[in-house]
Amino acid sequence: MTDASNAPSPGFLARAFSQKLPFWYALVLSLIADLATKAWADATVRPIAPAKIEVIPGFLAWAWAENLGAAFSIFHGKANMLSIIALAIIGGIFVFMYRATPDRRWFILALGFAAGGAMGNLHDRLLLGHVRDFIFFDFDLPGHTWTVTLPFSDGPSRPIPQRWPIFNVADICIDIGVGLLMVITFFTKEKKPEGK
């Protein structure tokens, strides 16, 4: 009989692909969904901007936006820096995926969603210099609308109303991945070694 402890460890392809299929399913699904919906919005929503398409009046609309920054337009105009950060994050995600044991399926799935979303937005920054956004929650609730002071080229800075930012499918996938990771972190207990 062959001692299982002496069995060869899985090779690179097994550890990166065949044992991590949930990661690749989530990544490919996220990336295709993001790029396909962006292409649709580019052809349908962008030509009528700044007008918007009402989906659910008073709640949801399609509205075109070209984000030169990250979430909430932070680091506005820093596309190169954001691309480098995104590449580093994606690289880190792949390292975590490779090192994860196959039984951590939810963890691997979460990494796939996060990677797919990050790659979708990175695609836009590298090829277009901005990220295409089009999903807009068009309503006013406490915490959803606030006032910010922004500079204007035609005069001094002045306050303007600001709503929850327009976003895209990649952002949703990133949120799903991060949300799953948070649930796993807070609600999954580490297995304690059994006493002999």
Image (cartoon, rainbow, N blue to C red):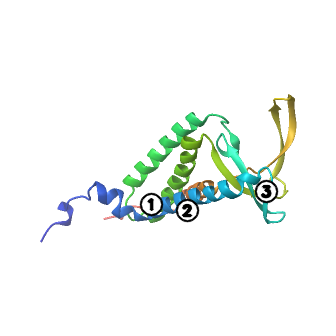
Which residue sits furthest left?
Answer: 1
Q: Of the residues shown, which amino acid type is indicated by label 2?
A: Phe
Give the numbered dot on residue 52: 3
Task: Name the residue type under label 1.
Answer: Phe
Residue located 83% across and 50% down the image: 145
Q: CA distance from mark 2 to mark 3?
A: 41 Å
Mark 2 or 1 closer to N-term? Answer: 1
The local crowd at label 3, few if under 14, some if 14 to 19, many if 20 or more residues have their Cα within 10 Å, is some
Q: Is 125 situated above or below 35? A: above
Q: Residue furthest bottom?
A: 1
Which residue is label 2 attached to? 187
Q: In the image, what residue occupies the spot 80% across and 58% down?
A: 138
Which of the two marks, 2 or 3, is nearer to us in this view? Answer: 3
Label 1 element class: helix
Rounded to the nearest angstrom, the CA distance separating label 2 from label 1 is 21 Å
Question: Which element is circle 2 on?
Answer: helix
Q: Which of the two residues, 88 or 136, is positioned nearer the viewer here?
A: 136
Tell which tag, 2 or 1, sits nearer the viewer.
Answer: 1
Can residue 134 be seen by looking at this rendering? Answer: yes
Assess whether mark 3 and mark 1 are in contact (beta carbons under 8 angstroms): no
Give the residue pinned by disc 1. Answer: 23
Q: Residues within 10 Å of mark 1 (few under 14, many from 20)?
A: many
